[in-house]
Image (cartoon, grey):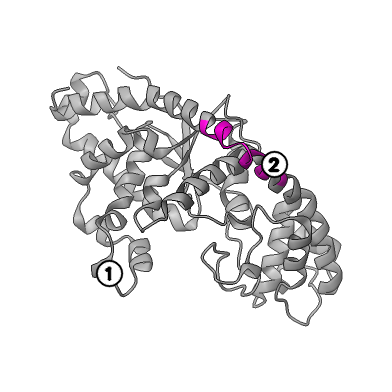
Amino acid sequence: MIELKQRVFSGVQPTGNLHLGNYLGAIARFAELQNSHECIYCVVDLHAITVWQDPASLAHNTREVTAAYIAAGINPQDHIIFNQSQVAEHAELAWMFNCTARIGWLNRMTQFKEKAGKNRENASVGLYAYPNLMAADILVYRATHVPVGEDQKQHLELSRDIAQKFNNDFSEQIADLGYNDGFFPLPEPLITGPATRVMSLRDGSKKMSKSDPSDLSRINLTDDADTIAKKIRKAKTDPEPLPSETDGLKGRPEAENLVGIFAALSGASADEVLRTHGGAQFSSFKQDLVNLAVEKMGPIGAEMQKLMDDTAHIDAILGDGAARAREIAAPVYAEVKKIAGLIA
């Protein structure tokens, strides 16, 4: 019988152009959680190939996400960093969950509709079914907590539904093995910190995105100090000075976005930022934001570049992490096979 431990799992897709939104919304939070939880952080390369990827770019981007994890402060000795495709149990459990999840559940997944767009008939089966793989990513480690943003809450709910259905479908077999509370835990969301939805620097109504054709819309984690400064100074604003209270940000998405970024980078609340900068023109506020962003993000970009210059070192970290991940995942999947009546 496998003991259930409090464990955090999350992952980032290696699709290139990691940016400030990825850092503030996910990676920085990952680094904080390692101080209080046992953490497993994955580069989800199997999710990336639900749409076609250039093989050389996929390998480069996988290493870049790994470098970002480490540069942000995640310790690969104390916690696990690996790429998903090195641990076969992810894909094997995903097939089990393909046979557990219902078509109606997947039809309700809004991200498939958004990503497939009008050309849905041409989308890959993987893009349609990848929420089942996401559930397998979490549950193959019997993870109890998952840090999620707004756009992933629906997938975590599906993971809980799949876990519950598996537990119900095989309740007798699970109990016979001594698991009195079900085999899979129902993973709980961990609420992420401030500025989890960082918006475009060119349009405050749109989320900062690696796919935006304008590089000025985002601060990439690999940007140098001059580039960070240029992008912040060119960020879209409105002609009014900053308000002294957050109520004054209503209807001003660009102002709200820049204040949110400043708050997240400084560790202050938006109210605290406005108490200091309320009444200021954007020219002076932007300069303060430039100084802060360069101070916080510059060392991360520099460390990422240093790590990317030694790909053998990154690959060794991924290989070691994958071996340690398999030590957890293999016994879990072996129990699943036993529960389902599959002969090992």
Residue ID at (61%, 50%): 23
Indicate which disc residue 120 carries: 1
Q: Foreground: 87 or 59?
A: 59
Say how many tags the image has. 2
- Pointer 1 or 2: first along the chain: 1
Q: Position of residue 170 (x, y in %)?
A: 17, 32
Q: Give left or right: position of 4 versus 315.
A: left
- Residue at mark 2: 303
Crowding near the residue tagged with mark 2, few <14, some 14–19, many ≥20 C-alpha atoms within 10 Å: some
Q: Which residues are magenta?
A: 302-315
Q: Position of residue 76 (x, y in %)?
A: 57, 29
Q: Nearer the viewer, mark 1 or mark 2?
A: 2
Q: Amino acid at mark 2?
A: Glu
User: Where 256 falls versus 239 (above or below)?
Assistant: above
Q: Position of residue 242 (x, y in %)?
A: 79, 72
Q: Give left or right: position of 255 versus 207.
A: right
- Magenta stretch mostly in which secondary structure? helix
Q: Amino acid at mark 1?
A: Arg
Task: Evaluate whether residue 176 shows in this view.
Answer: yes
Q: Foreground: 6 or 283?
A: 283
Residue ID at (79%, 64%): 274
